[in-house]
Amino acid sequence: MWTGFHDLDDTFRAFDLLQRRLDRAFDHWAADAPQAAGARRRLRTVWPATNVFEAKESFVVKAEVPGVAESDVAVSVEDDALVIRGERKSAVPEGYTAHWRERSSIAFTRKLPLPTRVDADQVSATLKDGVLTVTLPKAKDTLPRQIAVKAS
Amino acid sequence: MSDITFEKQNGTNLGAAPSKPRARRAVAPPIDVFENADELLVVADVPGVAGDGIDLRVENGILRLEAKRAAAENASPALAREYEDVDYVTTFRIPAGIDTAAISAQTKNGTLQVHLPKAQAAKPRKIAVS
């Protein structure tokens, strides 16, 4: 199917496509054992890909979650770790038939331990253009404090 | 999904913030292709791309799809880095029977949806038998 549709001018892309094709072939082979297939998928990839930034008074976590609706993602702070749970639904749209699929449905949970305690009440999260941004202010008592030195 | 590992093997800068902004790399996004009676629908994962970052070009029967990410505003040092701020480029040979002038696209939740309407002549038509 792809020979006619894709313009494969890049060898590496061809290999990448081949690999994806093979990955899916095995998914299909394991279709009657969905549990096993799911476990294998978790071993192979981490989804969503996440970047963690540290500012003076907060951490900023960004995760790439293309195709995830606001209502399909939940963010929480548990035991000084940020937990992102959700589901990327990728069904064939109503009335269409699928020719080529590289975007699978994914249910995900990621637990990211944080180096210091955070103020869980002040954590905020936004979802924009498929990027989830979570801002976690550090707990007040973990921030550096200036001690005034008095002459005696 | 294999995109992620593939990119990492090619030198994702793990664990450190880039000291200066480099030219962004462009990768081919994962895509789905669907079809109904009226159109072909291409869906691509392009996280970080807003509607105005999309560029579609049709040339010699090839559709070139470019999606540019908005500039990253986060300059804090990274503790962990699993993805790069890449742009997306991919090309398709447009099959026969597509009305290239009517190709349109929109973004939604970091996915790009490209509609390629079929030309009237290519649509299934019911022939009345008299």
Image: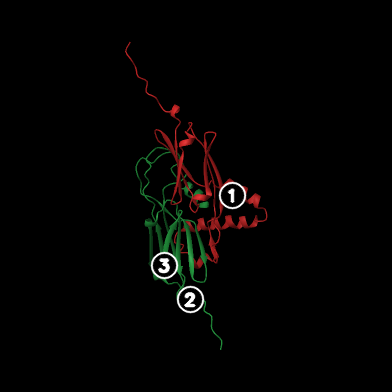
Q: Which residue is mark 1?
A: A41
Query: Which quadrant would residue A79 be assigned to in this image?
Result: top right
Depth check: give the residue in front, B103 or A26.
B103
Check disc 1 and give the amino acid type. Arg
Residue drawn at x 62%, y 50% as measured from the top left: A38
Residue B39 percent coordinates (x, y): 48, 69
Does the CB distance between marks 3 and 1 fall below 8 Å?
no
> Which residue in the structure is indicated by mark 2?
B122
Callout 1: residue from which chain?
A: A
Q: Quadrant of residue A110?
A: top right
Taking the view exactly as shown, the residue that stands out farthest to the top is: A152
Q: Tell me, what hue is chain B?
A: green
- The picture places residue B28, in percent across and down from the top left corner, at 45, 56
Above or below, A107 relative to A58: below
Residue B75, numbered label:
none
Which chain is the one coloured red?
A: A
Circle 3 sits in a helix, a strand or a loop, which is it? loop
- Residue B6, x across and y down, in percent: 49, 50
**Mark 2 on the same chain as mark 1:** no
Q: Mark number for residue B103?
A: 3
